[in-house]
Amino acid sequence: MKQRTDRILVVGFVATLFLVGITFFLLPLQRFSELENRYLQSAPQLTWDNLLSHTYAEEAESFVTDHFPFRAKWVWVKSAMEQMRLQQENNGIYKGKDGYLFEKFEAPDHNKVQQYTAAVKRFADKNAEAKTTFLLAPTSVGLYNERLPWLAPVYSQAEVNQTIAEDVGDSLTFINGFNVLAPHAAEDIYYRTDHHWTTYGAYLAYIAYAKSMGWQPLSQSEFEIETVSDSFLGSYHTRSQFNGVAPDSIQMYKPVHDVSTKMHIVDTGETLTSMYDPSYLEKKDKYSYFLGGVHALMKITSQLDPKVVKQEKLLVIKDSYAHSVIPFLTQHVPEIHVIDIRYYNGSISEYMAQNDIKDALMLFNTATFVDNASILKLN
């Protein structure tokens, strides 16, 4: 009887693996996960370099994980089970106090961080004729770690930012996001359910950069502040699937004295007359309302009164934290070039030279910067 039962279990296990494998190959591959609000791992490239560096194995594992059949449903089931056990963490997201969700931030690989920081420093030194500014913003867990669940481990982003500030030295202007945001910690500077800062947090970053450049930033009274959505459940919510989480609101700061702006997306060849895409407000990824989401290269031109122009051109090298900051910058700079270093593969130094750009702003959040090998593309 026992042998028969064992045989049934073995046959059932093999059949399950076979069905999962067949399903894996039959289902169409998704490029973007609406649930997790991120691009999924593409099929790994089999080359000798990738094999020797273990890159192929790592990408293959990520590919299988990202495209596992009915993955979204498994994520939901796992979250439901974790909450039934009163767990305060799921898929790397903590359920904190005051309605905040937080992403785990663990000690980064300091050797890699040193490599990335060295790449930033070399870029600034190589383009010494340009003024380079590096604004490094903490994520919400860096500023609000006291709101984490009891005994939840977290590594200090403040320490990371300070180390990076010391490493870049005098090669560029470093703006520590902690100094910018900490005085306003009691205000709504981060979304509670998403990894980005709010438009108000972006406004504070704009003020800090403007002052570092010697500009006179616009006051809040010079904007009409409109709530464009009050149903935003962001990336932290989609990853954790925690129940009973209140949605965030998204605000848009419209200048009282607005200017005509065109946004050319080099990736697609499109030219748009707005930096905002309202269609995303009806989707899960509502933050892509700003700039219409992620693009490798954009050029934004504004019809400014020559009296208010502080510099003719600016290059922004960024992650998505910059998306809600850039509209503020268009009030001072008539030509802004925007590169997302994760997707742009050309020489950035050559691009600056070809377009006669003398000012560059690097804007990243700490969690992205310390885990972003794309930074090495700077060199």
Image: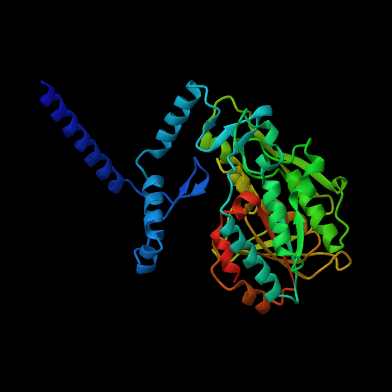
Classify 147 as above or below 86. Answer: below
Write down the quadrant of residue 332 in the picture: bottom right
The number of numbered badges drawn on the structure is 0
Quadrant in the picture for residue 309:
bottom right
Q: Residue at x 37, y 65 (%)?
A: 52
Q: Is residue 276 visible?
A: no
The reply, left or right, for residue 325 in relation to residue 72 is right
Q: Nearer the viewer, residue 12 or 223?
A: 12
Q: Position of residue 161 (x, y in %)?
A: 70, 52
Percent x, y for residue 124?
70, 70
**In the picture shown, does residue 169 fall above or below 242?**
below
Q: Residue at x 39, y 68 (%)?
A: 49
- Tell whether 368 sits left or right of 254: left
Quarter containing the C terminus: bottom right
Q: From this viewpoint, is residue 86 visible?
A: yes
Front one among 15 and 54: 54
Residue visible at 87% across and 64% down?
308
What's the image's color scheme?
rainbow
Image location of residue 104, percent across then percent down: 58, 40
Question: Where residue 281 appears, x then y in whole percent?
Answer: 61, 42
Check the picture and name the quadrant holding the N terminus. Answer: top left
Asked if residue 170 lies left or right of residue 235, the reply is right
